[in-house]
Image (cartoon, helix red, strand yellow):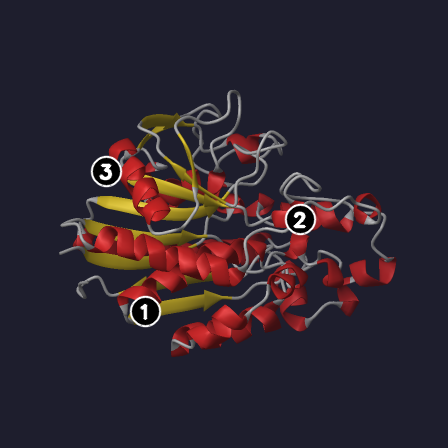
């Protein structure tokens, strides 16, 4: 009989750079000529945003933000070590990294073996050195689970869930940082190099209509006025259903399985209605309150349009986790909701008790 642990955490790339660079995304946004000047004026910002930005561009606040995130990551790692999983399944988005114009699967099981990953690729491209002072091309080994991934894909297909699968990443492509940063941050002191557990990734096309249109990320307002949108991504409800299907696929095994959602919640650079300046905290709060209450009806009633309007694209990974926890009836034993206006995204952390079995 399988045993399960549920975890939710962030893969926030700027946690890997120094405090004085942690607000770089906001600095980049403030240079967008398409944003009206009155919205760039700190005097017009919410109180939290002004306090975090302060007179130093967020540097002092970044230290506190890092400390808070690291404490929550430590809690997640402690739960993982206590559980001692056979495999860590991670739902993470692909941001125009492995999947590009050639193919964009809604869901893809990555049946990779031992893989050398450079975790600093994303921030290297933005000219931000890593906080560990390690070489830019440093790599760590991600211990994949190719046989387990093949079996899982087969189980999902037999269950009527039409997932894609991949045996190797795109040539010259980046390894999805949602997955890489999960290992990096759960082994923060060692920059990911001593993480002992197998990781079985499932990528989710969280960016949907913006996957190719915005190349999975940042865009100036002038560039998006007439953008040619892509087909939408999978719906929140379908992601919830995938989580349930994954739980069922493992339930009949004798494995200890950690199921992990890897992403922040709403992102400023995806929140068009607030000029990419801050995340949509009210929208996040609605889902967090329901999350804590185990109100999955509110989650499954959430539409894809609502997710996109709030800049919550990457939360589809959490809808997968929610579906699995609902299927397994695992209780939420701890969570934390970290709110920020300056550091691009609100972050949530969660632990669902692994002592329950299916």
Q: Earlier in the sequence, mark 2 or mark 1?
A: 2
Per the model, the C-alpha gap separating discs 1 and 3 is: 24 Å
Front-lying residue, 69 or 209: 209
Element marked by disc 2: helix
Up-down relation of residue 93 to residue 130 (above or below): below
Can the viewer see residue 74 in this picture?
no
Front-lying residue, 327 or 264: 327
Q: Which residue is at 28% across, 70% downward? A: 329
Q: Which residue in the structure is indicated by mark 1?
A: 334
Q: Which residue in the structure is indicated by mark 2?
A: 209
> Which is more foreground, mark 2 or mark 1?
2
Would you call the spot at circle 2 few (<14 residues within 10 Å), some (14-19), or many (20 or more)?
some
Front-lying residue, 35 or 87: 87
> Which is more foreground, mark 3 or mark 2?
2
- Residue 103 on image: x %, y %: 57, 33
Q: Earlier in the sequence, mark 1 or mark 3?
A: 3
The answer to whether mark 3 and mark 2 are in CB contact below 8 A is no
Q: Quadrant of residue 149?
A: top left
């Amino acid at each position: 009989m399988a045993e399960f642990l549920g975890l939710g955490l962030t893969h926030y790339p700027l946690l890997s750079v120094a405090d004085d660079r942690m607000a770089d995304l906001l600095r980049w946004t403030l240079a967008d000529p398409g944003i009206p000047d009155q919205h760039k004026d700190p005097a017009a910002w919410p109180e939290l945003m002004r306090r975090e930005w302060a007179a130093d561009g967020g540097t002092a606040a970044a230290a506190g933000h890092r400390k808070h995130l690291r404490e929550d990551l430590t809690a997640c790692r402690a739960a993982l070590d206590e559980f001692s999983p056979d495999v860590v399944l991670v739902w993470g988005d692909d941001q125009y990294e492995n999947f590009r114009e050639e193919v964009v699967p809604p869901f893809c099981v990555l049946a990779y073996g031992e893989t050398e990953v450079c975790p600093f690729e994303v921030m290297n491209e933005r000219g931000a050195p890593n906080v560990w002072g390690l070489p830019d091309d440093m790599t760590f080994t991600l211990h994949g689970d190719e046989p387990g991934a093949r079996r899982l894909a087969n189980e999902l297909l037999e269950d009527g869930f039409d997932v894609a699968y991949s045996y190797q990443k795109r040539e010259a492509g980046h390894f999805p940082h949602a997955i890489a940063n999960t290992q990096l941050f759960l082994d923060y002191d060692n920059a990911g190099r001593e993480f002992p557990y197998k990781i079985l990734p499932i990528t989710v096309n969280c960016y949907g209509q913006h996957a190719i249109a915005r190349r999975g990320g940042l865009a100036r307002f002038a560039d998006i006025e007439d953008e040619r949108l892509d087909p939408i991504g999978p719906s929140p409800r379908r992601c919830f259903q995938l989580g349930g299907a994954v739980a069922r696929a493992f339930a009949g095994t004798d494995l200890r399985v950690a199921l992990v959602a890897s992403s922040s919640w709403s992102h400023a650079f995806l929140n068009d209605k607030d000029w990419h300046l801050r995340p949509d905290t009210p929208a996040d709060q609605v889902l967090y309150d329901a999350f804590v209450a185990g109100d999955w009806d509110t989650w499954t009633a959430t539409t894809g349009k609502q997710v996109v309007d709030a800049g919550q694209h990457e939360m589809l990974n959490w809808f997968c986790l929610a579906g699995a926890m609902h299927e397994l009836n695992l209780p939420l034993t701890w969570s934390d909701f970290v709110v920020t206006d300056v550091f691009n995204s609100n972050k949530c952390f969660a632990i669902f008790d692994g002592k329950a079995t299916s």
